[in-house]
Amino acid sequence: MTGIQSYIARIDAVEAQRQRIYGTASGGDIWGGTAAQTFRADPQRELDANLTVIASYLQPQDVFVDVGGGAGRVSLPMSHRCREVVSVEPSPGMAEGFRSLASDNQITNASVILSSWLDTGLDTKSISGDVVFTADVTYFVRDIEEFIRGMEGRAKRRAMITVWSQPPPNRSAEIFQLIYGERLEALPGYRELLAVLWEMGILPDVRVLPDSPWWESVPTSREQATDLALRGRWLKAEDQDRARRLVDGRFDELFETGSEGFQPKWRPEMREILITWETEQRLAI
């Protein structure tokens, strides 16, 4: 099985397990509402260490295209460091979050296109940039080769992908197995993505960025720790009470108590990984 085939097989296994346990998805904007609010961030904030590295690749006259840019957590801060930012975002809720943040902060060189990156109706001629970037999207992309070809074909100088060393949905694997009695099918991460790129003839630079996940913290109470263990869309509403009893019964196995709070033993250290390559050299070949 090739790297691309293995990537697709992982996506398919995750989807098959999801349908078997949760049934067919009802549709709608799963990234809207509360989810969109979670990913809002002040565009004027001081850049953290990870975003500082990403910004270091930009030049003042660049157009920065953010694929699946959400509410602009990355692209809106970049608007102060380049000529223009364009977010291509399929979620109406996320796109509205982007627009409102840009408007509230008087950012005039930022726009959002409500579309999937793989939408055949997307205007490939008008949507291009000096740098094409995506963060935390590739875990969910079945047509990974087409997705990457689209990034490379629309990036005049550089393509950039960031993923976490463990895909965030995979963080619940041990708790999932405790609740449902089976192994969680894992989404593809950086290892699988690199295999795809190498198979496509792309040899990227890979950098491990310094900061821990911006959304994670150590719970300071037993109740907060239990909430952390059961957080996410993977737990069905009807299983909440049973799940709390199971976590409570295994609490000392799942958490280490320290001076700062309750450290999850089942959640390994995680870092953001930047995968990037120059496209102008490859496209000239």
Image (cartoon, rainbow, N blue to C red):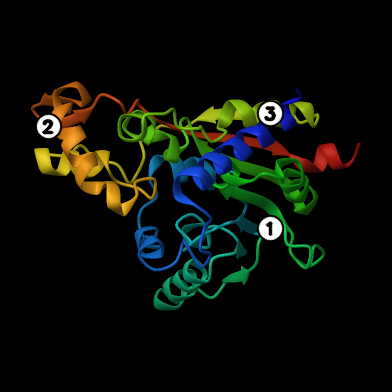
Sort mark 3 into few (<14), some (14-19) or many (20+) by Cα contacts within 10 Å.
Answer: some
| Horizontal side of residue 92 vs 84, given as left or right | left
Q: Find disc 3 in the rendering and name its residue.
A: 6
**Is disc 1 placed on a helix, strand or loop?**
loop
Closer to viewer: mark 3 or mark 2: 3
Query: 88 or 156, which is in the foreground?
Result: 88
| As drawn, 37 above or below 215 | below
For badge 1, the amino acid type reads Trp
Closer to viewer: mark 3 or mark 1: 3
**Is disc 2 placed on a helix, strand or loop?**
loop
Label 3, label 1: how far apart the Cα atoms are: 22 Å
Q: Position of residue 95 (x, y in %)?
A: 52, 70
| Horizontal side of residue 267 vs 114, given as left or right | left
Q: Position of residue 31 (x, y in %)?
A: 46, 61
Sort mark 1 into few (<14), some (14-19) or many (20+) by Cα contacts within 10 Å.
Answer: some
Do the CB atoms of the residues marked 3 and 1 lie less than 8 Å apart? no
Q: Residue at x 44, y 70 (%)?
A: 97
**Is disc 3 placed on a helix, strand or loop?**
helix
Closer to viewer: mark 1 or mark 2: 1
For badge 2, the amino acid type reads Glu
Query: 79 or 251, which is in the foreground?
Result: 251
Q: Find disc 2 in the rendering and name its residue.
A: 260
Q: Position of residue 121 (x, y in %)?
A: 78, 68
Q: Residue at x 12, y 43 (%)?
A: 223
Task: Say which label, 1 or 2, has the lower sequence index.
Answer: 1
Quarter of the image where one finds residue 1: top right
On residue 117, which mark appears? 1
Give the quarter of the figure containing the C terminus.
top right
